[in-house]
Amino acid sequence: IKEVYTFGQPRVGNEAWVQAFQAKMVNIPYFRVTDYMDPVPHLPPSWLLGYRHAGPEVWYNATMLKHYKICSDGMMKLAVGSTPFGGACSMLAITAPT
């Protein structure tokens, strides 16, 4: 496997699973691509059995392809006053080519 991209991926395991997955994928680029209106990446709830995401998130905050953020910590963090499907990355790099 050279690289992995998932689209609209739900949370699939707990912290131990995420660590094991990341150890296996250490030399393989892995990105979770999410859309601002997609509820699936928020499922199952993180408080339920400790479900977590693996890998950085590429979060599109609009329908235009040039508007995205890369969340290196794996998940968008909800900001005060934000909707359940929006917010701000706790660590991000805006890489929108013109």
Image (cartoon, rainbow, N blue to C red):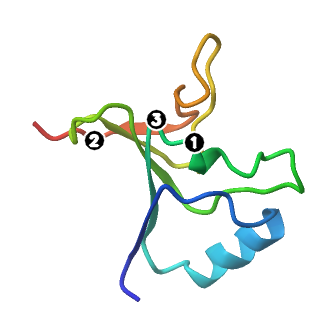
- Which label belongs to residue 39? 1
Q: Can I make out residue 87 in this image?
A: yes
Determine the residue positioned at 77% across, 45% down: 45
* Crowd rating for badge 2 (residues with CA inside 10 Å; few <14, some 14–19, many 20+): few
Mark 1 and mark 2 in contact? Answer it, CB < 8 Å.
no
Image depth: mark 1 or mark 2 in front: 1
**Residue ID for mark 3:** 37
Report helix, strand or loop for mark 1: loop
- Which label belongs to residue 18? none
> Label 2 amino acid?
Thr
**Residue ID for mark 2:** 95
Image depth: mark 2 or mark 3 in front: 3
- State the CA–CA distance, disc 1 to disc 2: 24 Å
Q: Can I make out residue 73 in this image?
A: no
Q: Nearer the viewer, residue 72 or 64?
A: 64
Q: Give the mark, 1 or 2, whose residue is nearer the N terminus.
A: 1
> Label 1 amino acid?
Pro
- State the CA–CA distance, disc 2 to disc 3: 20 Å
* Crowd rating for badge 1 (residues with CA inside 10 Å; few <14, some 14–19, many 20+): some
> Label 3 amino acid?
Met
